[in-house]
Amino acid sequence: MSVAAADWLPSATVTASGRPVLSAGEIERHLLPLADLEPEENPRLAPLRGCLLALTSHRLIFLHEPSLSARALPLASIVHPYPPHRKNSHNPLRSIFSSSSSSSHHPRIRLQISLPPSRSEVVAVVVTCKTDVDVFYGRLVEAIRARAWEVAAAAVPASGASVAEGAPAREDLAIRMPVVGVSGILRKEQETWESAGQNLQDAFQDLNALMSKAKEMMELAEKMRQKLLTNQSNSGDEEMGSKQDMQDLLLSVGIVSPVTKETAGALYHQQLSRQLADFVRVPVERAGGMMALVDVYCLFNRARGTELISPEDLLQACSLWDKFDVPVMLRKFDSGVKVIQTKTHSDEEVFARISSLAQKPDALQKGISPTDAAFTLGIAPALAKEHLLNAENKGLLCRDVSPDGFRFYINLFNEIDPQNIYLTKTHGVYHTWISVATAAH
């Protein structure tokens, strides 16, 4: 991507995993694996080469994946899009005998755009990958005609004041906040059921209405999150902490624009992998740096709303993390249990906490259970058991299996002097264990 592109295209924010950051109310519509943006009449405008092209409801985002940098062409600046064509399509013989790799043979979608302050340019989106260009063009035209950016702008009070401060009444998301609450949705649905006679057709209408309200709530949450991000830089440390908590809470409401097979096409698993990495980072960190894959599956599907994914899709998305520079990884224990953990997660730190727990007087006498370890580590008992088994494999613990389940004890064999196995130490864990055992009798 040329640096000179900054002269005429605004930059776009990219997540750590390489996904474009969408603004409030912005929805992803289509993805192209490889595309260029070329000026057709002005050589002073630098072209963009080899980019992943994301069509959203607001922008055309050209993402250069190797550098994790992106530029955006607002759809509002597109005066007129022209149907796709090939430069040499009028000459079949030239197309046959020319090199197939020439960019002139790739489909081009010409766009007449308006750039500030008041000049018009013609650029071309050159689709250099194998795809149905007509489908992309159709969705581009739909997005331009929908003018979603105007709807989003109209939803913000012109004076900047909140609704509670007397902003003028308007039919938008901000005004409808009380209606999208749980009680408001239930009340609205109850009224609809009573008036419609509770027949099958009305049941489907009610379901669609509920999904629409849920989408509005997610868009509202995204607006609030973007507002927090904007104001964070001007806040104190204490305020920033509370705002970060609020931001994480709003992220848990759901994903406004989940990656789907329809929008991503051949890039589905790649983009799903990146979106999953962005989403799962906060929950995994809050869970102590590790979370069972089945828990992630439930959490991620809940955030995606009606766009559910299969377990196979989740596994394939996780397996692609090795190719990306993301802060999380998929791990498989010897028992076969699969978890997602942060790359900064340290087994040594976990072993140290388990060892400290196992050396307490009560634990030296009775041992520790997976539930005890789960309480200390702040994780699920199933994961705690895996950590205990892993500590046993490292020689830190010994296991006792009884009808009551597994009990783990500190490994005292490490404390015995191999040169004199009958010598009782007057210090260390072994001495403490002797004292506890003697006191018990």
Image: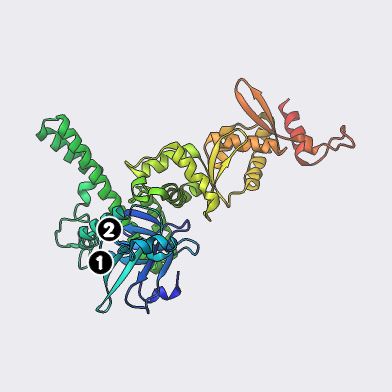
Which is in the foreground here, disc 2 or disc 1?
2
For this view, does 423 lie left or right of residue 309? right
Q: Position of residue 205 (x, y in %)?
A: 18, 38
Three-letter amino acid code at the position of disc 2: Leu
Three-letter amino acid code at the position of disc 1: Ala
For the point 64% across and 29% down, the residue is: 407
- In the displayed structure, 63 sits above or below 342; it is below
**Pointer 1 local density, CA inside 10 Å: few below 14, some 14–19, many at least 20:** some
Farthest left residue in view: 195
Say which quadrant the C terminus sits in. Answer: top right
* Residue that carries the numbered disc 2 in the rendered image: 140
Tell me the element at label 2.
helix
Q: Position of residue 172 (x, y in %)?
A: 19, 56
- Label 2 vs label 1: CA separation? 12 Å
Look at the image and tell me whether residue 27 can be seen: no
For the point 63% across and 47% down, the residue is: 349
Q: Position of residue 57 (x, y in %)?
A: 28, 58
Q: Position of residue 217 (x, y in %)?
A: 27, 49
Colouring convention used in this rendered image of the protein? rainbow
For this view, does 339 lie left or right of residue 84? right
- In the displayed structure, 5 sits above or below 68; it is below
Look at the image and tell me whether residue 113 can be seen: yes
Quick one: label 2 or label 1, which is nearer the N terminus?
Answer: 1
131 and 171: which is toward the camera: 131
For the point 22% across and 51% down, the residue is: 177
Where residue 115 sits, quadrant-wise, is: bottom left
* Residue that carries the numbered disc 1 in the rendered image: 76
For the point 87% across and 35% down, the residue is: 423
Tell me the element at label 1.
helix
Say which quadrant the N terminus sits in. Answer: bottom left
37 and 190: which is toward the camera: 37
**Pointer 2 local density, CA inside 10 Å: few below 14, some 14–19, many at least 20:** many
